């Protein structure tokens, strides 16, 4: 090949790449001596040497390109290596090392795939695919692949869904396969989205060499280009998963114009959160929380079997019922169990804090007492009682679906734990806040 010299391999096992403008890059596989990166302006150009750097051991098994022009970054690593070298450029043609990303030995043996300027995926022999930041900190480690796949490719579809592909395997029956995982919702335990096998005769590929690249298509599909050394080259058309944007609960409840009505009233939105209350009705009325706040999930007709600690995804219409912001679901399919976890600790508040800012949130008011314990509900009954801290008095709502109805009324100070709810007929809906909950 014209203009290519030096290295154990002049071009490292087909580890060539191109940027979005069609500029082609490849490197040699050095075993000490000079590591070189070559640059072709286009397919007919003569290569130039974009970088020559002395190395003391094997280097150049993996190459990845991100960006174009003076924003181009080149990522390279070695089999068994403990770093990913990053090379940058001031003129778009000549490169020098700008960063070293530390990694676990061999973590990038098979491939590097850049997500953005702050993170990347790597894949190595008999290791899970790992997402790291540019300081080498592990951000996610997948439960796949179950066998060694030597390449990795991060893809983001035009609809927002995120996919991770692995390719090339040195085990019998696996050498020509490519697997694509949907990591949109869960990078640690993704679902297998697609499986493809190229060619019809399997040949040995001891170095697990190969590559995978992709492009977006106008119809929303993705074209995936697969190369497995000694076997075949193939192009696949990939249908992508449906993408549903997840809203923060605080955003769902936002009231930027301060009229005590949610800005997203009647919008169809999706949230994910952890259930932290029992179900308070024969249909659905429970509360979920994420890192930004909590909200009521409601339906007069749709039943559920969720319990506190369940992590659920909910899609529904934003409603405002007697001051309380809710997500109203219309079908059992609008609520999905996606995992289990633990209920986060309640936030300590004073009774004076009750208001719109913490509606739907899981709270604890410490050292309060009942104004009139005789109003405590009998078993099977609801009740609204007054509690005070000596300065402020608020409503403590006991639901018959809790464990409180029928128990002896406390006549001592206690900690009140529950959700900030609201029930009012006022306009604007700026009163009627209450704590629906339990006592400690």
Image (cartoon, helix red, strand yellow):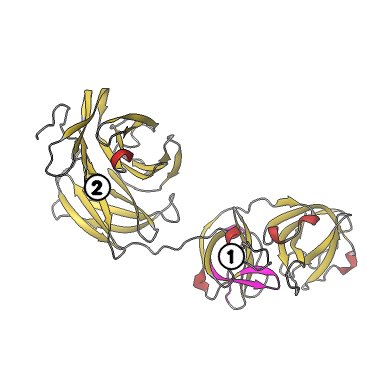
State whether residue 329 appears in this view. yes
Quadrant holding the C terminus:
bottom right
Mark 1, other Cα within 10 Å: few <14 / some 14–19 / many ≥20: many
Task: Indicate whether 58 appears above or below 412.
Answer: above
Which marked residue is nearer to the observer: mark 1 or mark 2? Answer: 2
Report helix, strand or loop for mark 2: loop
Rendering coords of residue 388 (x, y %): 86, 58
Where is residue 206 shown, x and y percent of the image?
A: 19, 39
Viewer can see residue 313: no
Residue 73, by quadrant, is top left
Q: Quadrant of the N terminus?
A: top left
Which residue is pictured at 31% across the width and 33% down the height? 90
Dots 1, 2 in contact, CB < 8 A: no
Q: Which residues are magenta?
A: 302-326
* Picture residue at 52% right of the left edge, 73% below the top: 332
Q: Residue furthest left?
A: 2
Q: CA distance from mark 1 to mark 2?
A: 51 Å
In this figure, which residue is indicated by the disc labeled 1? 306
Does the magenta run of residues contain 319?
A: yes
Q: Which mark is residue 21?
A: 2
* 1 or 2: tag closer to the N-terminus: 2
* SS under mark 1: loop
Q: Is residue 225 above or below residue 5?
A: below
Where residue 201 appears, as percent x and y from the top left, is: 13, 52
Q: In the visual, does 131 lie left or right of 37? A: right
């Amino acid at each position: 090949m014209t203009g290519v010299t030096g290295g154990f391999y002049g071009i490292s096992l087909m580890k060539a790449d191109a940027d979005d403008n069609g500029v082609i890059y490849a490197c040699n596989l050095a075993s000490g001596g000079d590591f070189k990166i070559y640059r072709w302006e286009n397919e007919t150009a003569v290569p130039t040497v974009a970088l020559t750097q002395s190395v003391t051991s094997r280097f150049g098994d993996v190459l990845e390109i991100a960006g174009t022009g003076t924003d181009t970054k080149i990522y390279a690593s070695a089999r068994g290596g403990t770093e990913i070298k990053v090379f940058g450029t001031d003129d778009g043609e000549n490169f020098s090392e700008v960063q070293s990303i530390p990694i676990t030995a061999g973590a990038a043996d098979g491939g590097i795939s850049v997500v953005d300027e702050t993170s990347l995926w790597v894949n190595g022999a008999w290791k899970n695919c790992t997402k790291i930041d540019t300081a080498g900190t592990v951000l996610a480690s997948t439960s796949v692949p179950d066998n060694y796949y030597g390449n990795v490719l991060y893809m983001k579809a035009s609809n927002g869904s995120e996919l991770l592909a692995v390719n090339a395997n040195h085990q019998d029956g696996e050498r020509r396969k490519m697997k694509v995982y949907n990591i949109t919702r869960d990078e640690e335990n993704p679902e297998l989205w697609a499986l493809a096998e190229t060619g019809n005769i399997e040949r040995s590929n001891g170095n697990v060499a190969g590559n995978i690249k992709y492009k977006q298509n106008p119809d929303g599909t993705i074209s995936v280009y697969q190369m497995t050394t000694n076997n075949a080259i193939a192009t696949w058309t990939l249908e992508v998963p449906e993408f549903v944007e997840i809203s923060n609960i605080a955003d769902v409840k936002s009231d930027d114009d301060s009229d005590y009505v949610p800005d997203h009233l009647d919008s169809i939105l999706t949230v994910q959160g952890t259930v932290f209350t029992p179900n308070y009705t024969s249909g659905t009325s429970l509360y979920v929380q994420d890192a930004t706040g909590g909200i009521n999930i409601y339906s007069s007709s749709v039943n559920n079997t969720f319990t506190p600690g369940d992590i659920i995804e909910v899609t529904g219409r934003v409603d405002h019922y007697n001051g309380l912001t809710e997500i109203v679901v219309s079908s059992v399919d609008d609520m999905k169990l996606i995992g289990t976890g633990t209920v986060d600790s309640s936030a300590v508040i004073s009774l004076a804090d009750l208001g719109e800012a913490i509606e739907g949130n899981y709270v604890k008011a410490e050292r309060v007492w009942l104004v009139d314990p005789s109003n405590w509900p009998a078993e099977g009954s609801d009740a609204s009682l007054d509690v005070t801290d000596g300065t402020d008095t608020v409503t403590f709502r006991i639901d018959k679906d809790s464990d409180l109805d029928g128990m002896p009324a406390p006549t001592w100070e206690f900690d009140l734990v529950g959700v900030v709810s609201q029930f009012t007929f006022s306009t604007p809906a700026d009163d009627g806040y209450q704590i629906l909950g339990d006592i400690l």
